[in-house]
Image: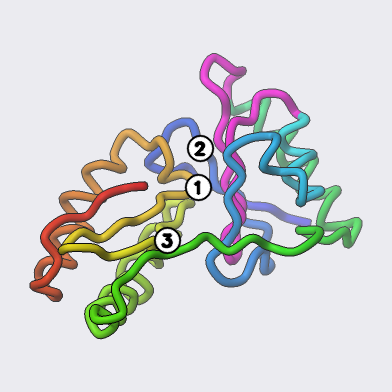
Amino acid sequence: MLIETERTPNPATLKFLPGREVAPGEGVDFASHEDAQRSPLARNLFALGDVERVFFGPDFVSVTKAPGSSDWEMLKLDVLGVLVDHFASGAPLLEGEAVEAETFDDPEDAEIVAQIRDLLDTRVRPAVANDGGDIVYRGFQKGIVFLHMRGSCAGCPSSTATLKGGIENLLRHYVPEVTEVRAV
């Protein structure tokens, strides 16, 4: 099995492309070893010791190394080994039921929320996925859009610029009711 790797804007994160579907839909983010208990693959990646975060995208896996851990050359080989073993075994990506994160919206804002979600799904999320991350809608209240950053976006040095300079400007341009975008 050939797994390609790509750098991301976050120097602590590498994107692994196994050439197959990984996690359809919004993907799955594991910010700690404790979060990873429902995924055999995520548990094995965290067991390497130098892994701080794991994100499963539609066709990729982003792995963030812990601060002060070994360089990527050594860790990358270990991650590739875990990925190859997992995909070759046919083991499930996830076990048990997913817990849906709640969103908070005013029902009167349904049309605005639909516009925001459409822009995020068609313009923002594909671009962010190219960098090994994801941005998920969490709510809209009083002009403020709340987004959750996952994968390589979480903790990325350029994430604030992406959020404010890119996403906020895009949403404010197309949806005048949007006044601000905040990460949650």
The residue drawn where x is 31% and y is 56% is 146
x, y percent for residue 178: 14, 66
Q: Secondary structure at mark 2?
A: strand
In the picture, residue 117 is in which quadrant? bottom left
Identified by mark 2, the residue type is: Thr
Q: Which residue is mark 2?
A: 13
What is the C-alpha distance between the residues marked 2 and 1? 8 Å
Q: Is label 2 or label 1 in front?
A: 1
Q: Is residue 56 left or right of residue 40?
A: left
The residue drawn where x is 43% and y is 32% is 11
The residue drawn where x is 14% and y is 74% is 175
The circle drawn on residue 151 is 1
Quadrant (top left, top right, bottom left, bottom right) of the N terminus: bottom right
x, y percent for residue 99: 64, 60
- Give the residue furthest to the bottom: 111
Identified by mark 3, the residue type is: Val
x, y percent for residue 79: 71, 38
In the picture, residue 10 is in which quadrant? top left
In the displayed structure, 51 sits above or below 1; it is above
Q: Is label 1 or label 3 in front?
A: 3
Q: Is residue 25 left or right of residue 156?
A: right
